[in-house]
Image (cartoon, grey):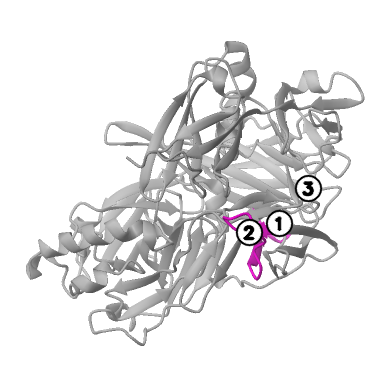
Amino acid sequence: MLLRIPFFMLASLAFPFTASDGSSQDQGSPRVRIRGEARTLASTAWQGATIVLRSEPEFDIPEAGVRDVQTATTDAEGRFAASLLRGRSYTAFAFEENSDGIVRRSRLVRDLVAGSTPVFVESHEPALRVTLHLHGLDAWRDVGALAAVLVDEAGNRIPVTIGSTTESTPEESSSIRLPVVAGDRARIYCWCGTTPILVRSFDLLAEPRRRGCKALRAEFERLAPGDLAPGLVKPAAASLLDPTIEHGFIGKPAHLSIRVLGPDGPIENATIEFVESEHGFTSLQGTTDSGGRTELLVPNPVDEAGRPEQSRTLDVQVVAPGHQLAPRRIEVANWITEGARADDFEIRLDRGIAARLRVLGFDREPEKNVPVLALLSHMIARSRQREVSSRLLLLRTDDAGVVRLDGLGDRTSVTNIVVLERSEVDTATLLRIALDVDGQALSTKKDLVDAPRLGSMRTISVLDPDRSPAAHARVEVVRAPTQWYEGSLFRARYRTDRRGRARVQVTDGAIAAASKDGFRALRCSDAFRFDDASLQLEAYETCRGTVRDREDEPVPGARIRLVLDSGPMDVALAELIGELPRAWNMTLLDTVTDSDGQFDLRWIRWPAQELTVSIEVGDKRKRVRLAPAEGSVATDLRFDGR
C-alpha cells in the first residue's frame, strides 16, 4: 500500500510562499539564551560564520505557534550566542559566503532545543552557490503572478524570488538565485497564481554536479529541434557545463477540463487538488461550477531535457461535502489541450456517511472548542495494486464537544484522530493526545460516537546511562508497534525539561526516549509500574576510528555513514518496538571526519545486526563491511580513492 499524502505536508505546505520569513516570537513564550561554537575543517575557530536557526510549526494552526528564525555571527574565537523559544525544536547550520560566491557550510544539526550547546563543524571543501535557470517561463508571465519556495532537507520553507537575470540571453529568460539553506539537496516549488508549474529536486552546491552537467550537455547534443517541446529553446552547451547553474524546463500553459459527478448528477463546489510530488505536496486547483465542471490550467508535460513527455501522469484528489474522497490518476498527455475541449475527464464520487464524534477528556466530560486532527484513509485500486490515499482534516469541537466528519463509508475510514493541546511546561509546543475511536462505528452509525482520551497523563523521569537527568531528551509514546512510522498521529511527542522530566500520555502501548548519550524503549505498563516512573537510558553502540589514504595520511572532511543491514529482530523486541530503532537510528549514523581524519558514530543495536561503513570523499565512494563485534572498538578505515 502507498500512503499518497503524508499528513504533515498537507497542513504545512498548502500555500507556503505566502508566509513571512522573519524572526518572530510566540506571545507568552520566554526565550532561552544558548551558546555554541563553529569550527573549520582544520579544527580552528570559524570566525565570521553565520549561524541560522529555524523552527517551523508542525501544523498550520494558531495553537502550533509561528515560524521562528534566528541568526547569529561567530566571533574571533568561533563562538556565538542566540535566544531560542523554550521547548521548540530547531534545525540549524553555519555558513560563510565570500564575495566571489564561494560558500563554506557546516553539516545540519537537527532537534536543537533551548539549553543545548551546539558545535558546528565545516562539512566539506568550499563550493560555489548555484543559480536555477527556468526555461519556458515567458508563456506564463501573462497568466498570473509567479512565486517560488525552496524546501530544504530540514523541511524549512524559504520563499525565493523569480526575476530576470541581468546576464540572461534570449534562451535564459528567468533565474532564481538560490539561498544557502540546510542540507546538500533541496526541492523547488514554483507557481503561477495557484497553479504549480514546476516541482524539482537538485543539488545546492556546484562541485558534486559537474558530471550531471556534462550528461545534460550530451543529452542535448543528441536532440533535434523537433524533439523539444514547442516554445522551449535549447540552452547553450557552455551554460550546461557551468556547474553553478541548474536548469529547469516548464511546458507552455494547457487546459484540463474535469467534471465531477455523483449518484444524483453533477456535484457543485467540489475541490480539485493535485498531488505534486512523492513527498505529498498538494496544491489547490479550483472548484466545480453548478454543472460539476472546472477548467484547469496546467503545464504541458516535459521531461528534464525539455522534450514533450507523453507518459506523465497527475494524481488528483476530489473532495466534496458529504461525499467520499476520490483519488484518481490522470494521464495528462491524453487530456490536456491548447484550448478548451468539448469532452471532460469525469470523476465519480460516492455519497458518504456524515458521522458525529464527541470528544471526551480524561474526566469523561466533553471537550469544548479544542482542535482535533483526523486522518481519513481511502482505498483505491490502481494497476493491479491497492493504494491508500489519505487526507488530514483540522476540526474544532463545538460547545457540546462534538465534531462532524463527512464522506465516510466502505472505502473511506478514520485511521487516526487526536486532540492537540498546549504543553503544560511550554506554550510553544503542541501535544498530541490520542483518542479511543471506534472507526467502524463512525462509518456505520449516524448517532453520536464517543471518543474519550486514552489512558492518563503521568510524569516520567528520564535518566542518562550515568544516571544523571537527561535534559531535553526526546520522548515518544505509541499505542502499538505499527504506529512508530513517521506519519502516525498516535505517535505523541514530548521533550523532557532540564530536570529530565516530562508529562506524557500513558496508554497500553510503548514508550521510548533518546538523549545524546542513550536510548531505551519499554512497554508503558513496565515504565509506569510504580508511582515514581523513571526510564534509564542504555548507552548507544559506538564506532570510533580514523580514515587514512594509501600514504597512511588522515583524510579530513570525509563523510562517514553507517549502513545497518536489517537482520532479523528478536520476536519479543519486535512486538515491543517494531521498526522504531531503524527509524531513530537515521539521526545517529552520519558524520564527517575532523582535521585528524577521526570520526565517531553511534547507533541502536539489536541482535543479528550487520554493519557496513560507507566512506565518501568528493564523488568517490567505498564501502567496508564490519563484523558486529567490531562495532564498539576503534578501527582504521582505508580509503584508496578507487
Residue 210 is left or right of residue 219, and the answer is: right
Q: Which mark is residue 278?
A: none
Q: Which residue is drawn at 55% across and 21% down?
A: 630
Q: Residue at x 17, y 55 (%)?
A: 310
- Magenta: predominant secondary structure element? loop
Quadrant for residue 37, please give it: bottom right
Q: Which residue in the structure is indicated by mark 1?
A: 64
Q: Residue at x 38, y 60 (%)?
A: 207
- Residue at the far right in the pictured view: 531
Q: Does the magenta stretch include residue 54?
A: yes
Query: Are the residues at dot 2 and dot 1 in contact (C-beta closer than 8 Å)?
Result: yes
- Dot 3 or dot 1: first in sequence order is 1
Query: Are the residues at dot 3 and dot 2 in contact (C-beta closer than 8 Å)?
Result: no
> Could you classify mark 3 by the number of other residues whose Cα lies within 10 Å: few (under 14), some (14-19), or many (20 or more)?
some
Kindly state the secondary structure of the residue where label 2 is placed: loop
Q: Which residue in the structure is indicated by mark 3?
A: 400
Calculate the distance from the C-alpha at mark 3 to the C-alpha at mark 2: 25 Å
Q: Is residue 253 visible?
A: no
Q: Residue at x 58, y 65 (%)?
A: 95
Q: What residue type is labelled 2?
A: Asp
Residue 329 is left or right of residue 4, and the answer is: left
Q: What residue type is labelled 1?
A: Ala
User: Residue 254 placed where, x, y %?
Assistant: 25, 69
Q: Does the magenta stretch include residue 294?
A: no
User: Residue 388 placed where, x, y %?
Assistant: 43, 37
Which contiguous range is marked in magenta? 38-62
- Dot 3 or dot 2: first in sequence order is 2
Q: Which residue in the structure is indicated by mark 2?
A: 60
